[in-house]
Image: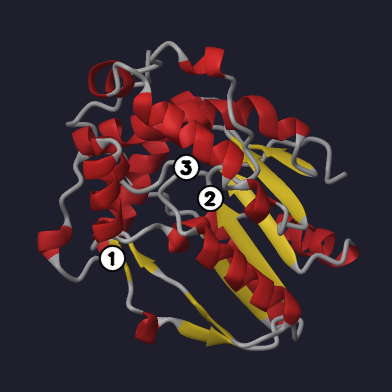
Amino acid sequence: MSPRLHPSTHVPAKTSPGFDANLVEQVLQDALAHGSRIHAITGLQGSGKSTLAAQVATLARARGLRVAVLSIDDFYLGRRERQRLGSQVHPLLATRGPPGTHDLDLACATLDALREGRPVRLPRFDKLADTRLPPSRWRWARAVDLTVFEGWFLKTPAQTQDELREPINAVERDEDPDGHWRRYCNDALARDYPPLWSRLDRLLFLQPPGFETVPQWRWQQEQSLQARAKAPALRTMGAADVQRFVQLFERVSRQALRRLPGIAQWTLTLDAQRRPVIGPGPA
Protein backbone atom coordinates (compact mmCIF):
# COMPACT_ATOMS: atom_id res chain seq x y z
CA MET A 1 0.00 0.00 0.00
CA SER A 2 1.35 3.42 -0.93
CA PRO A 3 2.11 5.85 1.92
CA ARG A 4 -0.57 8.47 2.43
CA LEU A 5 -0.43 12.26 2.57
CA HIS A 6 -3.75 13.60 3.86
CA PRO A 7 -5.06 16.45 1.69
CA SER A 8 -5.48 18.70 4.74
CA THR A 9 -1.99 18.04 6.03
CA HIS A 10 0.21 21.11 6.25
CA VAL A 11 3.90 20.37 6.23
CA PRO A 12 6.14 23.44 6.47
CA ALA A 13 8.70 23.75 3.71
CA LYS A 14 12.24 22.89 4.70
CA THR A 15 13.96 25.95 6.15
CA SER A 16 17.46 24.50 6.46
CA PRO A 17 20.05 26.37 4.35
CA GLY A 18 21.21 23.05 2.98
CA PHE A 19 23.74 20.35 3.73
CA ASP A 20 26.68 20.72 6.09
CA ALA A 21 29.68 22.50 4.59
CA ASN A 22 31.95 19.56 5.40
CA LEU A 23 29.76 17.22 3.35
CA VAL A 24 29.67 19.66 0.43
CA GLU A 25 33.47 19.83 0.57
CA GLN A 26 33.68 16.05 0.58
CA VAL A 27 31.40 15.73 -2.46
CA LEU A 28 33.45 18.25 -4.41
CA GLN A 29 36.72 16.60 -3.44
CA ASP A 30 35.35 13.22 -4.48
CA ALA A 31 34.56 14.61 -7.92
CA LEU A 32 37.96 16.24 -8.32
CA ALA A 33 39.94 13.32 -6.93
CA HIS A 34 38.44 10.96 -9.51
CA GLY A 35 38.68 13.37 -12.42
CA SER A 36 34.92 13.59 -12.88
CA ARG A 37 33.72 15.85 -15.65
CA ILE A 38 30.08 14.75 -15.18
CA HIS A 39 29.43 14.18 -11.47
CA ALA A 40 25.98 12.77 -10.73
CA ILE A 41 23.77 13.07 -7.65
CA THR A 42 20.62 10.96 -7.42
CA GLY A 43 17.90 10.52 -4.82
CA LEU A 44 14.15 10.15 -4.63
CA GLN A 45 11.80 13.11 -4.88
CA GLY A 46 12.47 15.82 -2.32
CA SER A 47 15.71 14.26 -1.02
CA GLY A 48 17.74 17.45 -1.44
CA LYS A 49 19.71 16.55 -4.56
CA SER A 50 19.07 19.94 -6.21
CA THR A 51 20.13 21.71 -3.03
CA LEU A 52 23.32 19.67 -2.75
CA ALA A 53 24.13 20.14 -6.45
CA ALA A 54 23.79 23.91 -6.07
CA GLN A 55 25.98 23.92 -2.96
CA VAL A 56 28.70 21.89 -4.68
CA ALA A 57 28.59 24.25 -7.66
CA THR A 58 28.87 27.32 -5.42
CA LEU A 59 31.88 25.88 -3.64
CA ALA A 60 33.54 24.85 -6.91
CA ARG A 61 33.07 28.33 -8.37
CA ALA A 62 34.60 29.83 -5.25
CA ARG A 63 37.66 27.67 -6.02
CA GLY A 64 37.86 29.12 -9.53
CA LEU A 65 36.20 26.27 -11.42
CA ARG A 66 33.71 26.80 -14.23
CA VAL A 67 30.64 24.74 -13.33
CA ALA A 68 27.35 23.79 -14.95
CA VAL A 69 24.41 22.36 -13.01
CA LEU A 70 21.80 20.33 -14.84
CA SER A 71 18.91 18.08 -13.85
CA ILE A 72 17.36 15.23 -15.74
CA ASP A 73 14.17 17.23 -15.18
CA ASP A 74 15.51 19.84 -17.63
CA PHE A 75 15.16 17.20 -20.35
CA TYR A 76 11.48 16.38 -19.90
CA LEU A 77 9.59 16.21 -23.15
CA GLY A 78 7.40 19.25 -23.66
CA ARG A 79 3.72 19.18 -22.83
CA ARG A 80 2.67 18.77 -26.47
CA GLU A 81 5.00 15.80 -27.02
CA ARG A 82 3.77 14.11 -23.85
CA GLN A 83 0.17 14.69 -24.80
CA ARG A 84 0.90 12.95 -28.09
CA LEU A 85 2.36 9.99 -26.18
CA GLY A 86 -0.66 10.05 -23.92
CA SER A 87 -3.06 9.78 -26.85
CA GLN A 88 -1.02 7.28 -28.91
CA VAL A 89 0.45 5.01 -26.22
CA HIS A 90 -1.11 5.47 -22.78
CA PRO A 91 -2.79 8.41 -20.99
CA LEU A 92 -0.35 8.28 -18.06
CA LEU A 93 2.52 9.22 -20.39
CA ALA A 94 1.10 12.74 -20.58
CA THR A 95 2.47 13.26 -17.06
CA ARG A 96 6.14 14.22 -16.89
CA GLY A 97 8.75 12.32 -14.95
CA PRO A 98 8.71 8.53 -15.36
CA PRO A 99 11.09 6.80 -17.80
CA GLY A 100 9.97 7.40 -21.36
CA THR A 101 9.14 11.10 -20.87
CA HIS A 102 12.63 12.58 -21.45
CA ASP A 103 14.45 13.87 -24.52
CA LEU A 104 17.47 11.60 -24.21
CA ASP A 105 19.12 12.67 -27.47
CA LEU A 106 19.19 16.24 -26.19
CA ALA A 107 20.49 15.11 -22.79
CA CYS A 108 23.35 13.08 -24.29
CA ALA A 109 24.29 15.80 -26.76
CA THR A 110 24.34 18.42 -24.00
CA LEU A 111 26.51 16.33 -21.68
CA ASP A 112 28.87 15.49 -24.54
CA ALA A 113 29.35 19.17 -25.33
CA LEU A 114 29.99 19.96 -21.67
CA ARG A 115 32.50 17.14 -21.34
CA GLU A 116 34.38 18.35 -24.41
CA GLY A 117 34.34 21.99 -23.33
CA ARG A 118 32.27 23.12 -26.31
CA PRO A 119 29.82 26.02 -25.97
CA VAL A 120 26.29 24.73 -25.42
CA ARG A 121 22.95 26.08 -24.26
CA LEU A 122 21.61 24.48 -21.08
CA PRO A 123 17.95 23.45 -21.37
CA ARG A 124 15.57 24.46 -18.61
CA PHE A 125 12.12 23.11 -17.76
CA ASP A 126 9.44 25.23 -16.07
CA LYS A 127 7.65 22.83 -13.71
CA LEU A 128 4.85 25.23 -12.84
CA ALA A 129 4.06 25.83 -16.52
CA ASP A 130 4.77 22.12 -17.17
CA THR A 131 6.80 22.70 -20.30
CA ARG A 132 10.37 23.34 -21.39
CA LEU A 133 11.45 26.96 -21.72
CA PRO A 134 12.14 28.09 -25.30
CA PRO A 135 15.79 27.74 -26.39
CA SER A 136 16.14 31.52 -26.53
CA ARG A 137 15.93 31.47 -22.72
CA TRP A 138 18.54 28.74 -22.20
CA ARG A 139 21.79 29.97 -20.68
CA TRP A 140 25.06 29.43 -22.52
CA ALA A 141 27.83 27.39 -20.90
CA ARG A 142 31.39 27.58 -22.22
CA ALA A 143 34.59 25.71 -21.35
CA VAL A 144 33.06 24.03 -18.29
CA ASP A 145 35.42 22.24 -15.87
CA LEU A 146 32.76 20.31 -13.95
CA THR A 147 29.13 19.46 -14.58
CA VAL A 148 26.92 18.44 -11.66
CA PHE A 149 24.02 16.38 -12.99
CA GLU A 150 21.17 15.46 -10.66
CA GLY A 151 18.03 13.42 -11.03
CA TRP A 152 15.70 11.06 -9.22
CA PHE A 153 16.43 7.69 -10.88
CA LEU A 154 19.90 7.97 -12.39
CA LYS A 155 21.39 4.56 -13.25
CA THR A 156 18.36 2.67 -11.89
CA PRO A 157 18.09 -0.65 -13.79
CA ALA A 158 14.89 -1.98 -15.31
CA GLN A 159 12.77 -4.65 -13.63
CA THR A 160 12.02 -8.13 -14.90
CA GLN A 161 8.70 -8.86 -16.60
CA ASP A 162 7.62 -10.92 -13.59
CA GLU A 163 8.18 -7.93 -11.31
CA LEU A 164 5.88 -5.82 -13.47
CA ARG A 165 2.93 -8.17 -13.31
CA GLU A 166 1.15 -6.97 -10.16
CA PRO A 167 0.17 -3.32 -9.56
CA ILE A 168 1.82 -1.76 -6.52
CA ASN A 169 -0.56 1.15 -5.84
CA ALA A 170 -3.96 2.59 -6.69
CA VAL A 171 -2.79 4.41 -9.83
CA GLU A 172 -1.40 1.22 -11.34
CA ARG A 173 -4.44 -0.80 -10.27
CA ASP A 174 -7.06 1.66 -11.54
CA GLU A 175 -5.35 3.46 -14.45
CA ASP A 176 -2.97 0.78 -15.75
CA PRO A 177 -4.82 -2.49 -15.08
CA ASP A 178 -3.26 -4.30 -18.05
CA GLY A 179 0.27 -3.06 -17.21
CA HIS A 180 0.83 -1.36 -20.58
CA TRP A 181 2.11 1.92 -19.10
CA ARG A 182 4.52 0.32 -16.66
CA ARG A 183 5.86 -2.04 -19.34
CA TYR A 184 6.41 0.92 -21.68
CA CYS A 185 8.33 2.82 -18.97
CA ASN A 186 10.35 -0.25 -18.02
CA ASP A 187 11.23 -0.99 -21.66
CA ALA A 188 12.38 2.61 -22.10
CA LEU A 189 14.46 2.34 -18.94
CA ALA A 190 16.17 -0.79 -20.21
CA ARG A 191 16.63 0.32 -23.82
CA ASP A 192 16.98 4.10 -23.97
CA TYR A 193 18.58 5.30 -20.74
CA PRO A 194 21.88 3.33 -20.54
CA PRO A 195 23.59 5.65 -23.10
CA LEU A 196 22.83 8.57 -20.77
CA TRP A 197 23.94 6.64 -17.69
CA SER A 198 27.25 5.82 -19.42
CA ARG A 199 28.06 9.53 -19.56
CA LEU A 200 27.96 9.88 -15.76
CA ASP A 201 31.46 9.48 -14.31
CA ARG A 202 30.50 8.99 -10.65
CA LEU A 203 27.23 8.67 -8.76
CA LEU A 204 26.24 9.76 -5.25
CA PHE A 205 22.95 8.28 -4.02
CA LEU A 206 21.04 10.18 -1.32
CA GLN A 207 19.19 7.26 0.27
CA PRO A 208 16.00 8.02 2.26
CA PRO A 209 14.78 5.88 5.17
CA GLY A 210 12.18 4.41 2.80
CA PHE A 211 9.64 5.32 0.16
CA GLU A 212 7.23 6.30 2.94
CA THR A 213 9.03 9.65 3.38
CA VAL A 214 8.67 10.64 -0.28
CA PRO A 215 5.06 11.99 -0.23
CA GLN A 216 5.90 14.35 2.63
CA TRP A 217 9.14 15.46 1.00
CA ARG A 218 7.44 15.99 -2.36
CA TRP A 219 4.68 18.02 -0.70
CA GLN A 220 7.28 20.24 0.93
CA GLN A 221 8.91 20.66 -2.48
CA GLU A 222 5.58 21.63 -4.03
CA GLN A 223 4.96 24.23 -1.34
CA SER A 224 8.37 25.75 -2.02
CA LEU A 225 7.65 25.87 -5.76
CA GLN A 226 4.31 27.54 -5.15
CA ALA A 227 5.82 30.07 -2.74
CA ARG A 228 8.22 31.18 -5.50
CA ALA A 229 5.54 31.30 -8.20
CA LYS A 230 4.76 34.72 -9.68
CA ALA A 231 1.48 33.62 -11.27
CA PRO A 232 -1.07 32.32 -8.71
CA ALA A 233 -3.08 30.73 -11.52
CA LEU A 234 -0.31 28.17 -11.95
CA ARG A 235 -0.60 26.94 -8.35
CA THR A 236 -2.70 23.91 -9.11
CA MET A 237 -1.09 21.01 -7.22
CA GLY A 238 -2.65 20.35 -3.83
CA ALA A 239 -1.81 17.62 -1.34
CA ALA A 240 -4.19 15.12 -2.99
CA ASP A 241 -2.60 15.84 -6.38
CA VAL A 242 0.86 15.29 -4.92
CA GLN A 243 -0.26 11.97 -3.42
CA ARG A 244 -1.37 10.72 -6.82
CA PHE A 245 1.67 12.21 -8.59
CA VAL A 246 4.08 10.38 -6.28
CA GLN A 247 2.43 7.05 -7.11
CA LEU A 248 3.54 7.47 -10.73
CA PHE A 249 7.14 7.26 -9.47
CA GLU A 250 6.70 4.61 -6.81
CA ARG A 251 7.67 1.54 -8.83
CA VAL A 252 10.96 2.94 -10.16
CA SER A 253 11.66 4.61 -6.80
CA ARG A 254 11.40 1.31 -4.95
CA GLN A 255 13.64 -0.28 -7.58
CA ALA A 256 16.17 2.52 -6.99
CA LEU A 257 16.06 1.90 -3.24
CA ARG A 258 16.79 -1.79 -3.82
CA ARG A 259 19.47 -1.49 -6.47
CA LEU A 260 21.32 1.82 -6.30
CA PRO A 261 23.31 1.10 -3.11
CA GLY A 262 25.07 -1.61 -5.13
CA ILE A 263 25.60 0.67 -8.15
CA ALA A 264 26.49 4.13 -6.83
CA GLN A 265 30.08 4.83 -5.83
CA TRP A 266 28.76 6.55 -2.70
CA THR A 267 25.48 5.96 -0.86
CA LEU A 268 24.70 8.61 1.74
CA THR A 269 21.89 7.54 4.07
CA LEU A 270 19.46 10.28 5.16
CA ASP A 271 16.99 10.36 8.05
CA ALA A 272 13.40 11.59 7.71
CA GLN A 273 14.58 15.20 8.11
CA ARG A 274 17.15 14.74 5.31
CA ARG A 275 20.02 14.75 7.78
CA PRO A 276 22.92 12.54 6.71
CA VAL A 277 23.47 9.47 8.85
CA ILE A 278 27.12 8.71 9.52
CA GLY A 279 28.26 5.87 7.32
CA PRO A 280 30.92 4.84 4.84
CA GLY A 281 32.28 7.47 2.49
CA PRO A 282 32.73 7.18 -1.26
CA ALA A 283 34.32 4.12 -2.78
Q: Residue furthest left?
A: 233
Give the structural element (helix, strand or loop) at label 1.
helix
Quarter of the image with the C terminus in it: top right
Mark 1 is on which residue type? Arg
* Front residue (pair 208, 152): 152
Give the structural element (helix, strand or loop) at label 3.
loop
Q: Residue at 32% x, 61% y: name it.
A: 78
Circle 2 packing at 10 Å, graded few (<14), some (14-19), many (20+), is many
Q: Earlier in the sequence, mark 3 or mark 2?
A: 2
Q: Is residue 257 left or right of residue 59?
A: left
Mark 3 is on which residue type? Pro
* Front residue (pair 84, 92): 84
Name the quadrant containing residue 281: top right
Between tags 3 and 1, which lies in front? 3
Q: Residue at 67% x, 86% y: name it.
A: 118
Does the rendering let one see residue 153?
Answer: yes
**Residue 69 tag number:** none
- Residue ID for mark 2: 48
Q: How is the image coloured?
A: secondary structure
- Residue ID for mark 1: 228
Q: CB of mark 3 within 8 Å of CB of mark 1?
A: no
- Residue ID for mark 3: 99
Q: Earlier in the sequence, mark 1 or mark 2?
A: 2
Q: Position of residue 262 (x, y in %)?
A: 77, 31
Residue at mark 3 to residue at mark 2: CA–CA distance: 21 Å
Q: Position of residue 238 (x, y in %)?
A: 19, 42
Q: Is residue 212 left or right of residue 80?
A: right
